[in-house]
Amino acid sequence: MEELIQKLKEEIIEVLNLEEMEPEDIETDAPLFGEGLGLDSIDALELIVLLEKNYGIKIEDPKDGRKIFFSVRTMAEYITENQK
Amino acid sequence: MSLQVKKHISIIRNHARVNGKKAFSHESDDGYKKFIRAAYRHFETDYPKFFKMDSLSKLGFLSVEILLKDIDLSRFYSPDRIGLLLTNGSSSLEVDEKHMDSIRDRKNYFPSPSNFVYTLPNIMAGEAAIRHVFRGENTVLISDGFDADLIYDITRLAFETASVDCCICGWTEQYGNNYESLLFLIERGEGHLAALSSEDVIFEPSKLQEIYKQETEWKN
Amino acid sequence: MGRVVVTGMGMITAIGNTVAENLESLIQRKHGVGPITHLETSLKGELPAAEIGLSNKELAAYAGLGNAELFTRTTMLGIIAATEAYKQSMGRYKISDSSRTALVSSTTVGGMDKTEKYYRDYLAGGEYSFLVNTHNCSDSSMRISDHLGLRQFNTTISTACSSSLNAILFGAKLIKHGLADRVIAGGTDALSKFTLNGFNTLMILDKNHCRPLDATRTGLNLGEGAAYIVLESEKEALKHGKEIFCEITGYANANDAFHQTASSPDGYGPYLSMKQALDMSGVDLSEVGYINAHGTGTDNNDLTEGLAIERIFGEKIPPVSSTKPYTGHTLAAAGVVETVYSILALNKQVLFPNLNFSQRIEELSFEPVTELTEAEIGHVVTNSFGFGGNDSSLVLSKY
């Protein structure tokens, strides 16, 4: 799980163009949206594409993203449960 | 009604210039992408969302940033009354190509939503509006090169129809390593920003054309 | 400063090739949303759209253009609509050459419909690469001018979904300030793979027929179309004894300054554009007989537009409907298409229905009109809100 979490942090930085950040700067359990990284609805869609492209998991309803993308940890857990 | 150019900036050929004087230059000629990042850092723009923008929006956004550096328009003008009227030539062609490439291959089909957001020339105006909370009239017109008459007309009309009290207007064009941005800050007559430039510059097409020539033809 | 009036209208959409055909479809509740047939896309069968039922060859023949290959679909739609408007306003009159007629057009797709077909060929310097100049947003505007023999002011606005309302706004200003006697203002956008795939990746398309202003809405349907109106100074129109369809009494543009594609939660930008347009018109709120909403059917737009309407009108909300279930969202052309529908509503004294409505949006206090209804309408408000927070509104009044 830790490896996946580290990999996810790197991927998030890349797809969301978080230029000034290093993986260490992203707290595993901190909320990704709202406070903290302040990601928005378009970023959520990018994460949906990331999940499909890198992990083969397709999310049909963007509203499901709220729970799945709450934090890096919830993302990692979802991937572990659903990856084909 | 007399309108004045209170300040103008240009971003062209690795340089950013304010009122005709060099404000920043990037040593190496290593392309637009590296230049614009260096300019962002030089002007201490603290806005991480800059890095998500496409190349055109970065230019438009930074041009407005430099124009408004050390000026707080909200002291004098209501945000509903500040206009942003831009002209452009190639639209969002560079990011359009990126989007096109991402949808061409059925087997590697992953179009990016954040890419697509930028496939319109007016998003650069939107980004500047979000940053500075400009709620006044805003538009982007397409022209084949810098058109002083067009920029003058749309701005003058905005003032005459009383839809703006202060306006940012100009030409912002970018495609690959070809980029040119020339923005003007316009006020009525004396206005509130009197101290900005050492001389009164009347807002009229011939003056805009003269400034364009000066900003694109200077030699080091 | 003089009054600005409308003396001609022209359009082509998925529900008709002329203004008259569109009106008939609106009355008959005949919408144009369905399976994609002409556009060659992998999303065919997956997503509906409001496609115009003519192939490019048929469009060229209809417009009298000879070789369809030389024109983008966007351009051909524009020529067809602009010609109808021009003929209605100018057809019977001998107008001197010294009178100044401007063209203010708009588009977001531009020549993309052709570029995406011949992209590889262009890159390889192939046999179609002479067509690469048709890609620009300004190509359609220039060709419309050429076709109509217009030699004066010509410009193209590109501000996403509010483009053609902004074209009308700009045209009205040109006339008010004596820079033109007449302006043909409007916009055109053809369906393209570029746009379809792009909107799909933003996940705001409805896989079924859209349901604007409905609690269960899930997104928009894309459409294609073009429309133009001829604006003139009242003086100029009366000089030739022209039929006047309405007066443009108010217009405004504002930026929401919130997000690139979403509207602020309380719809502040939409509120500003509507309020400022109404203030300019001097029309009393109680006199507004109809609002043709932007009403795309997305979660975000319909709620925020609804809130903005409530903020202005309080408890006395005029009849509202979105006509996008008929035409789909025609992007740059949406503003002017819906302006023509608003003028038709004024002229025929009817409210057009908002199709597919069944359940009120929880947060709102009003529901849209669902039946074709006769009504006394003196003034209409129409909205178009574009990406980049670009929000515009128009007030049209009976002349």
Image: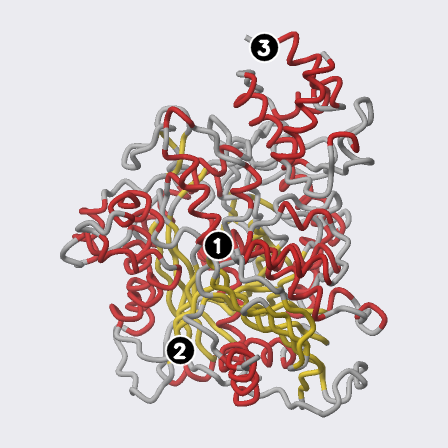
Q: Amino acid at mark 3?
A: Gln
The residue singled out by tag 2 in the image is C153
Q: Quadrant of the N terminus of chain B?
A: bottom right
**Dot label at residue A83:** 3
Which structural element holds mark 2?
A: loop
Q: Is residue C225 above or below residue B217?
A: above
Which label lies toward us, 1 or 3?
A: 3
- Name the residue nearer the viewer: C81 or C249: C81
- Name the residue nearer the viewer: C198 or C87: C198
Q: Is residue A34 above or below residue B165?
A: above
Render colour scheme: secondary structure
> In the rendering, at what x and y percent does residue C329 appear?
47, 43
Q: Amino acid at mark 2?
A: Phe
Question: On the same chain: label 1 and label 2?
Answer: no
> In the rendering, at what x and y percent does residue C99 appear?
36, 86
Picture residue at 65% right of the left edge, 59% below the top: B61
Alpha carbons under labels 1 and 3: distance apart: 37 Å
| Residue neighbourhood size for the residue with mark 1, other residues' Cα within 10 Å, grouped as few (<14), some (14–19), many (≥20) | many
